[in-house]
Image: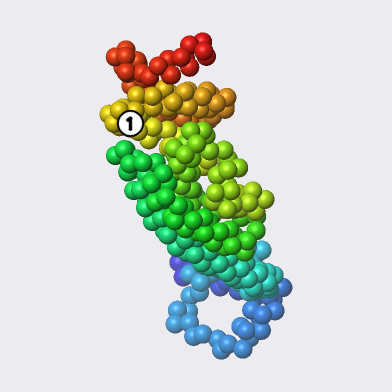
Amino acid sequence: MSSAPAGKSAGGERGRLRERRLAIRTAFRTASLPALSSASSRLPPLPCPNPNPKPVLFLLLPLLRTPPFSLRRFSSSPPRDNATSSSSSSYSLPFMEKQFEDFRHQLDESGSVRERIRSVVMEMEAAARLVHSSLLLVHQSLPVLEVLEKTKLQIEVIKGLFGRLAEILRERPDQYYRYHGDWRSETQTVVSLLAFLHWLETGSLLMHTEAEKKLGLDSSEFGLDIEDYLIGLCFMSNELPRYVVNQVTAGDYDCPRKVLKFLTDLHAAFRMLNLRNDFLRKKFDGMKYDLRRVEEVYYDVKIRGLASTESTQDETAQA
């Protein structure tokens, strides 16, 4: 009695397996996978050592439940089209190389111009140093005419060097302030020396146009920067207190009055300018200390009664 139901159950199980196999075949045949079906048709059937295909069916059941997902997994995706990105990168590469090639030429040209300017500036610095060393003789009570004669040759050398700078900048029009910083400090020093020499010779201020003329400059092409001129005047004022002390020591008691009047007028003229908080403003602030030192020397000379009678009469007439 027990063998009959067992045979019926085995036969039912075989029938169910046949149905599952038929369902699998139908699913794969009806699926839109021509590549997979053609490839699978050419492959020989794999031998199955296990006559019971139940585990294989359990692995295939999830695929049969979600056929769209399974089809996407087995389907071969078409390759991406990188023609647009490759063509755009190959299109921009020549333009990028051309741009940086132009940059390289511009930087090389600018570097060569700066080297030529620096060589001229080094010669200018050496000539200005010689003029300053000659001016130091004034503090040793050397006659002014002799000092002026010693500095004439170097002033002409400096004038020629400024002419060479102007020729270099003619090759680079409209780029004066791009290279201006390479000779700015030396220009300020030269202006201070010229202003001091002019005051020793005339007792008056060296004007901006006169400074340009002494240096052989043309304001339309290569002129003297206004800030460089003003800073040079501030540098010149630093030499006056020492000059006053040495002149009083040498017996020139009228020198403090002349220097005091000149510095007072110069300081008042500077106060007309609306200066920013920069290097020029700092140098102008230092001018008031130079003025104070000259005032102290002048008051000391006047209190001691060493001032000349002419200077006292001039002060009375001005009052």
Residue at 52% over, 34% down: 205
The vertical placement of 278 against 43, above or below, is above
Image coordinates for residue 116, horizontal then vertical, percent: 49, 64
Which residue does the numbered mark 1 point to in the structure image?
A: 247
Choose top left, top right, bottom left or bottom right for residue 100.
bottom right
Report the side of 198 relative to 96 (left or right).
Answer: left
* Amino acid type for the residue under numbered disc 1: Gln
Report the side of 247 relative to 205 (left or right).
Answer: left
Q: Nearer the viewer, residue 281 or 288?
A: 288
Tally the marks: 1
Regarding residue 15, the answer to whether it shows in the image is no
Image coordinates for residue 23, horizontal then vertical, percent: 65, 70
Image coordinates for residue 299, horizontal then vertical, percent: 35, 16
Mark 1 lies on a secondary structure that is helix
Choose top left, top right, bottom left or bottom right for residue 163.
bottom right
Regarding residue 120, the answer to whether it shows in the image is yes
Outermost residue toward the front in this view:
309
Image coordinates for residue 41, horizontal then vertical, percent: 63, 86
Q: How is the image coloured?
A: rainbow
Residue at 58% over, 43% down: 210
Report the side of 172 relative to 115 (left or right).
Answer: right
